[in-house]
Image (spheres, rainbow, N blue to C red):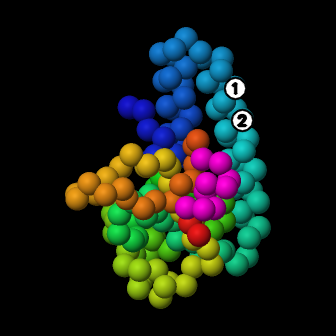
């Protein structure tokens, strides 16, 4: 099984090994995995020194649907925890992912909001209107990203 999302710290190297084998790029997969592990180890070592963990709300697919989808210690939220942060959804969402009310997000008083996004410019709602979204991530330049969340 390939998986970059559910448990990225554990599954990313395994997935890269599989892709390396499938595409005959075992050396490149091994190189990626060595760099990945070096970076993860560095981040986790530094995170151990963090005394006051910043609280973060990771907003999944910001703006595509009603606020506020997130993950409980999986996907990108797992990376927040590994980096020394505290993902507020871990205390609220019982399963792997779910929705938190905007009121609960405000009550949780996160130090930061991390919005995930992409290019959903072709996506329409049930009535055929374009959806609002945070244009962040792959293929989005800084000006477009800032304009989409202003």
Q: Which mark is residue 92?
A: none
- Helix, strand or loop at label 1? It is helix
Q: Secondary structure at mark 2?
A: helix
Q: Are marks 1 and 2 in contact (CB under 8 Å)?
A: yes
Q: Quarter of the image containing the C terminus?
A: bottom right
Residue 2 on image: x %, y %: 42, 33
- How many residues crowd mark 2 within 10 Å: few (<14), some (14–19), many (20+)? few
> Distance of mark 1 from mark 2, alpha carbons?
6 Å
Q: Which residues are magenta?
A: 140-148
Q: Which mark is residue 35?
A: 2
Percent position of residue 65, x then y: 35, 63
Q: Nearer the viewer, residue 134 or 69?
A: 134
Query: Label 1 crowding class (10 Å Cα cut-off): few <14, some 14-19, many 20+?
Result: few
| 146 inside magenta stretch | yes
Residue 134 placement, left or right of 94: right
The disc at residue 31 is: 1
Overall secondary structure of the magenta stretch? helix
Foreground of the two, 38 or 23: 23
Q: Position of residue 22 (x, y in %)?
A: 47, 16
* Residue 86 visible in the picture: no
Q: Residue at x 69, y 26 (%)?
A: 31
Is 62 placed above or below 138 here? below
Left or right of 57 in this view: 71 = left
Q: Is residue 20 magenta?
A: no
Q: Residue at x 63, y 62 (%)?
A: 146
Quadrant occupied by the N terminus? top left
Taking the spot 31% from the left edge, 53% from the top edge, the residue there is 124
28 up-or-down from 131: above or below: above
Q: Is residue 129 visible?
A: yes
Residue 82's place in the image compared with 138, above or below, is: below
């Amino acid at each position: 099984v390939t998986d970059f999302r559910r448990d990225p710290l554990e599954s990313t190297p395994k997935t890269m090994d599989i892709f390396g084998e499938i595409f005959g790029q075992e050396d490149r997969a091994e190189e990626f995995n060595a760099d990945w592990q070096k970076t993860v180890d560095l981040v986790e070592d530094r995170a151990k020194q963090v005394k006051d963990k910043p609280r973060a709300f990771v907003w999944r697919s910001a703006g595509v649907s009603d606020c506020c989808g997130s993950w409980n210690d999986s996907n990108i939220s797992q990376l927040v925890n590994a980096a020394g942060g505290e993902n507020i959804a871990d205390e609220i969402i019982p399963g792997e992912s779910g929705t938190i009310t905007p009121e609960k997000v405000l009550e949780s008083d996160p130090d930061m909001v991390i919005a995930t996004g992409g290019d959903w410019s072709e996506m329409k709602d049930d009535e055929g209107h374009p959806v609002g979204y945070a244009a962040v991530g792959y293929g989005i330049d800084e000006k477009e990203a800032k304009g989409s969340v202003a």
